[in-house]
Image (spheres, rainbow, N blue to C red):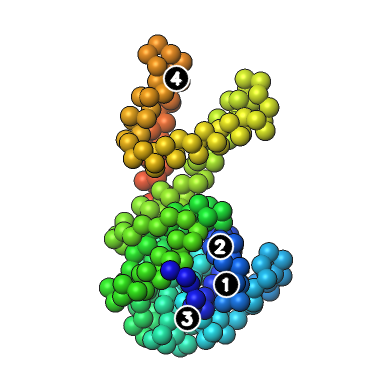
Amino acid sequence: MEVTKKIGVIGVGKLGQAIISGLIKNNPGIVNNIIGTVNHLESIEKVKKVFNINVSNDNINLVKNSDVLIIAVKPQNMSDLMTQINPYIDGSKLIISVAASITTNFIAQRLTEKIPIIRAMPNTPCVINKGMTALSASANCSKEDLQLASSIFEVVGETVIVDEYLMDGVTALSASGPAYLYVIIESLAEAGVKLGISREVSTKLAAQTMLGAASMVLSSKSHPALLKDMVTTPAGCTIDGLMELEEGKLRVTLIKAVVLAAKRARELVNN
Ligand SMILES: NC(=O)c1ccc[n+]([C@@H]2O[C@H](COP(=O)([O-])OP(=O)(O)OC[C@H]3O[C@@H](n4cnc5c(N)ncnc54)[C@H](OP(=O)(O)O)[C@@H]3O)[C@@H](O)[C@H]2O)c1
């Protein structure tokens, strides 16, 4: 579905830029239909250096001139922002919030008009069209609203629709996830360096291996344990590496990291 609506991105920070950049790469013509806002005047110039879009710190003007509002400010800024834009929200708008921890109910309670609200949780690989976005919708969203939101994020990667109560878990898994995986790539590359391989080659070996393994999981639809078994020759070297990972509690550490991040995601709105 082609996105022809006027899109306003409130908060052109790291994630806002990732989304805009993906949208423009896929459809350069969309640039005239995107406007953005930031908080500080000095940020305007920074964004203008990256994108040729209309960017300002005027949220009211943005709301008046957009059909779809993608809100990408920090969770802590959401309440004040809603109070500011509420008088200008009419029934024609669709809100898509990417703020971690902020529920559709939180937003609805701060708006006079009962408009459809979508909660989306993308991740930064959206910038290279390899994003993963989970979406959930307020009860008053139509199928078309959800389809429109999906089509915005589909151009920058894959999408799934989940019940809203799962969103903090999604935040901790796929939105924070790239950070965990960068640490793993960095560590594997350090191992290569320790073994005498150049950092450049080590990093390529580690990153492409992660990409290949992830692609195998997605394309084969096999359980990761089965794919692991395919690599693990009896009395070979992989089993020694796996034993070391078990001793270092890699699995439980990753599980606990995601569970803790989900707990933090639930708290973000308050501080
Ligand atoms: N980063 C991720 O990977 C990721 C993934 C999923 C979801 N998210 C969510 O996305 C949101 C943004 O995260 P981020 O990492 O992109 O943060 P960020 O880089 O700090 O960006 C926040 C942006 O919001 C702007 N802003 C703040 N208050 C504003 C206001 N009242 N009006 C207009 N713009 C305002 C800031 O402008 P200034 O720069 O001028 O202060 C900045 O451009 C958060 O809610 C986060 O939970 C992030």
Residue bearing the label numbered 1: 30
Asked if marks 1 and 2 touch (Cβ < 8 Å), the reply is yes
Separation of marks 4 and 1 at Cα, in angstroms: 48 Å
Res. 207 in view? yes
- Mark 1 vs mark 3: which is more N-terminal? 1
Residue bearing the label numbered 4: 238
Q: Is residue 264 above or below residue 79?
A: above
Q: Toward the viewer: 158 or 43? A: 158
> Closer to the observer: label 1 or label 3?
1
Separation of marks 1 and 2 at Cα, in angstroms: 9 Å
Q: Residue at x 38, y 33 (%)?
A: 251
Instruction: Categorize mark 2 by other alpha carbons within 10 Å: few (<14), some (14-19), many (20+).
Output: few
Q: Could you tell whether 89 is left or right of 52 in the image?
A: left
Q: Secondary structure at mark 3?
A: loop
Q: Residue at x 72, y 66 (%)?
A: 49
Residue 26 numbered tag:
2
- Mark 2 vs mark 3: which is more N-terminal? 2
Q: Residue at x 39, y 82 (%)?
A: 111
Q: How far from the left and from the top, in percent, is residue 94?
A: 41, 77
